[in-house]
Amino acid sequence: MTSREHSWHGCVFIGVSLDGFIARSDGELTWLTELEPRGHSADAAGAHPALDWESFFPGIDTLVMGRTTYNTILDFDEWPFTGKRVVVLSTTLESGDDRVTVARSLDDAVRLLDAQGAERVYVDGGKTIQAFLGAGLIDEITVSIAPVLIGSGARLFGDLDADVLLRVRGTHVTPDDGLVRITYDVTPR
């Protein structure tokens, strides 16, 4: 992993199945978005809780996502990122949505984030996370592990050139849905 200089803080906040998938092969997410209470037995928060959406998202000023994630978001009833700058990393997307700026490459995205004065950047989507992580552009990762094994689909992490060392900053379990949340700081090499 090579580490690139960047003035902003790159953050990941994502849900994953226990076996490491962020979506089924067809992109389906109900295994994560429609978790039913099953009488989970766990403390609601540890001494140092991980980030949850309510504590994570308000501190984000910019999002970077790939084309697949962008297409998924377009199916939502409402645009969830009002008031945030959104960059879509895509070599083929035609710019026609005033809510987003298209970056054609990782280098273009980094230049754009620097030019926009981004401070806390939420990086979303499996391939986009993998690219930013491989380039040393992720500083923090929060993973919410769902109590389910789905067997196949889109993996959160792909192959890496070198180990990525992490320091646990906080953990907790939410008893209603059984999500195990862990926030890590990425240790610079």
Image: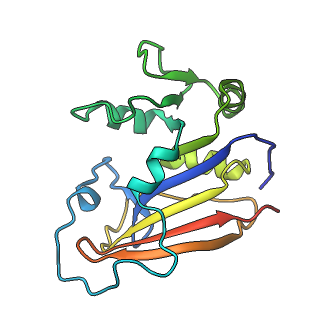
Residue 107: x and y in percent read: 72, 31
Q: What residue is at 53 percent from the left and 21 percent from the top?
A: 101
Q: Residue furthest top?
A: 96
Q: Is residue 102 left or right of residue 16?
A: right
Q: Residue 24: x, y in percent?
A: 33, 55
Is 163 rendered above or below residue 92?
below
Residue 143 located left or right of residue 41: right
Is 119 located above or below residue 150 in the figure? above
Closest to the observer: 144 or 52? 52
Screen quadrant of the N terminus: bottom right
Looking at the image, the residue that sits furthest to the bottom is: 41
**Residue at x 52% of width, y 46% of height:** 59
User: Can you give x and y, in whole percent of width and height, for residue 61 in the image?
Assistant: 54, 36
Would you identify the image quadrant in which residue 111 lies? top right
- Residue 186 position (above or below residue 121): below
Q: Nearer the viewer, residue 132 or 155?
A: 132
Residue 89, image quadrant: top right
> Is 169 situated above or below 106?
below
Q: Is residue 137 left or right of residue 124?
A: right
Residue at image x 27%, y 50%?
Answer: 28
Quarter placement of the C terminus: bottom right
From the viewer's side, name the closer residue of 86 and 107.
86
Q: Nearer the viewer, residue 47 or 11?
A: 47
Percent coordinates x, y for residue 116 in the rendering: 65, 25
Identified at 25% across, 31% down, the residue is: 78
